[in-house]
Image (cartoon, helix red, strand yellow):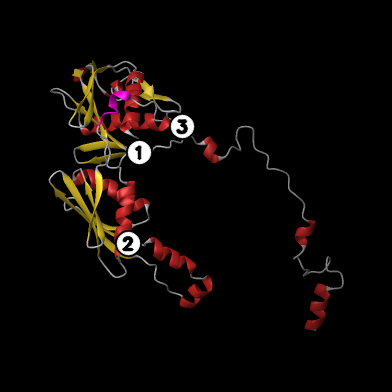
C-alpha cells in the first residue's frame, strides 16, 4: 500500500506530481521588475543621503560670528608627513620637510589669516617669527587664527618658532605668546591644528625655499654609538620630545606595545625582525597544517631612554626568549631612519 501511495505522488509526469523535484526551478524563473519607489521617498544610497553634520555649512565661531565649518572630505594627498604632538605643556608639529621649505609656508599661512610679521630672527639655532599685536573680534572673521580670540582678551602677540627636527631634513614648529597674556593649551592646539591643515591641503608642486633661513643649523640631531656590537641613539632632545615620536615609529613598523612609562623613559614591545618574517613566510601551508601550532616569531625588547645633559641616550635591550642582537640593531636603525 505504501509503495502505491509514493508512486502516485511522484507519477510519470514530474510537473504534475504532488511531490515534484524543485531543484531546477531557477531555470524557468523570471526576472522581477524593479521595485517602484513612492513619490515621497528616495532610493539614494544611505551614505549619500546621510551627510555629516556641518559639512559645507557655516557654523558659529568660538566667540560669536560665523566661520567655515570643520572641513570634511576635502583633504588633499600630501607627500609630507605632519604629526601634532602634545605632552603635558609641550606641543609641537613634526614635519617631514626641511626648515628652509617650511618657513615660506608659515609666511603664507600668516598672510592668508590676516596676520603680519613684525620681526624674525635666529636665536640659539631656532628661527623665531614674532607677529604684530592683534585683538579678537565678535563679527565674522575670515582669519582661522583671529577667530579663536574674544575682544575681551585684549592685545595678543604670537610667536612661532621653527627648528630642525630629530632627523636631517625635518622640522618642528611651536607656538607661544609674548607678554602677560599667555595662551592656554587649547588655543595652542587649535592654531597649530590650523597650520597643520593648511600644510596638508596646499597644492603639491614646486616649493619655495627661503634663503633667509638657509644659514639655520640643520645638522642631524640624532647620531649612533656602537657598544659591544649593539647600536645606541644619541638624540639632542628631552625624553618628552622623543618618547611619543618613538611610540609612533614602533607602531608604524608593526611592533606590539606591551607597556610603557614616559617618566622613566621605558617602553616594552614585542617585535618580529625581518629575517624571522622571511623564514615564517617560507613555510608552506602544508607544513603549517601539520605543525598546527607555529611560533609567531615575536620576541620581546625594552627601549630605555636616559637623559644625559642636553641629550637622550636611547637603547634597545633584549627582554625575553627569541630576542637577538639582530633585532636590537634593526630597531635602532628603524628609529634613526624614521624619527622626526
Q: In the picture shown, does residue 259 fall above or below 141?
A: below
N-term mark: 3 or 2: 3
The mark found on residue 110 in the picture is: none
In which quadrant of the rendered view does residue 1 lie?
Answer: bottom right
N-term mark: 1 or 2: 1
In which quadrant of the rendered view does residue 310 lie?
Answer: top left
Residue closer to the observer: 58 or 145: 145
Quadrant of the rendering where the C terminus is positioned? top left
Q: Provide the secondary structure element on which disc 2 rests.
A: helix
Q: Residue at x 36, y 27 (%)?
A: 209
The residue labelled by disc 1 is 96
Q: Are marks 3 and 1 in contact (CB under 8 Å)?
A: no
Q: Is residue 234 visible?
A: yes
The residue labelled by disc 2 is 327
Q: Provide the secondary structure element on which disc 1 rests.
A: loop
Crowd class of label 3 (few under 14; some 14 to 19; many from 20; radius 10 Å): few
Residue closer to the observer: 316 or 329: 329
The mark found on residue 74 in the picture is: 3
Q: Residue at x 19, y 47 (%)?
A: 239
Amino acid at each position: 500500500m505504501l509503495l502505491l501511495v509514493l508512486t502516485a505522488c511522484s507519477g510519470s509526469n514530474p510537473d504534475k506530481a504532488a511531490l515534484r523535484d524543485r531543484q531546477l526551478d531557477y531555470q524557468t524563473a523570471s526576472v522581477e521588475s524593479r521595485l517602484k519607489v513612492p513619490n515621497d521617498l528616495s532610493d539614494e544610497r544611505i551614505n549619500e543621503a546621510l551627510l555629516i553634520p556641518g559639512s559645507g555649512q557655516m557654523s558659529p565661531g568660538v566667540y560669536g560670528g560665523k566661520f567655515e565649518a570643520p572641513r570634511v572630505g576635502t583633504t588633499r594627498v600630501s607627500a609630507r608627513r605632519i604629526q601634532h604632538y602634545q605632552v603635558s605643556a609641550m606641543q609641537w608639529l613634526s614635519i617631514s620637510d626641511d626648515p628652509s621649505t617650511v618657513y615660506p609656508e608659515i609666511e603664507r599661512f600668516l598672510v592668508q589669516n590676516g596676520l603680519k610679521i613684525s620681526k624674525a630672527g635666529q636665536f640659539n639655532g631656532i628661527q623665531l617669527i614674532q607677529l604684530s599685536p592683534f585683538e579678537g573680534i565678535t563679527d565674522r572673521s575670515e582669519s582661522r587664527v583671529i577667530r579663536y580670540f574674544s575682544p575681551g582678551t585684549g592685545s595678543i602677540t604670537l610667536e612661532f618658532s621653527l627648528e630642525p627636527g630629530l632627523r636631517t631634513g625635518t622640522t618642528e614648529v611651536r607656538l607661544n605668546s609674548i607678554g602677560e597674556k599667555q595662551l592656554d593649551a587649547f588655543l595652542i592646539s587649535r592654531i597649530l591644528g590650523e597650520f597643520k591643515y593648511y600644510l596638508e591641503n596646499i597644492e603639491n608642486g614646486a616649493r619655495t625655499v627661503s634663503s633667509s633661513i638657509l644659514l639655520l643649523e640643520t645638522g642631524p640631531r640624532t647620531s649612533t654609538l656602537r657598544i659591544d656590537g649593539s647600536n645606541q641613539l644619541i638624540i639632542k632632545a628631552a625624553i618628552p620630545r622623543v618618547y611619543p615620536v618613538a611610540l609612533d615609529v614602533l607602531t608604524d613598523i608593526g611592533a606590539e606595545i606591551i607597556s610603557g612609562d614616559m617618566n622613566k623613559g621605558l617602553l616594552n614591545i614585542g617585535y618580529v625582525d625581518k629575517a624571522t618574517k622571511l623564514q615564517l613566510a617560507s613555510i608552506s601551508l602544508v607544513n603549517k597544517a601539520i605543525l598546527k601550532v607555529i611560533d609567531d616569531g615575536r620576541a620581546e625588547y625594552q627601549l630605555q631612554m636616559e637623559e644625559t645633559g642636553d641629550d637622550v641616550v636611547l637603547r634597545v635591550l633584549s627582554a625575553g626568549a627569541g630576542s637577538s642582537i639582530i633585532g636590537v640593531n634593526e630597531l635602532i636603525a628603524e628609529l634613526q631612519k624614521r624619527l622626526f
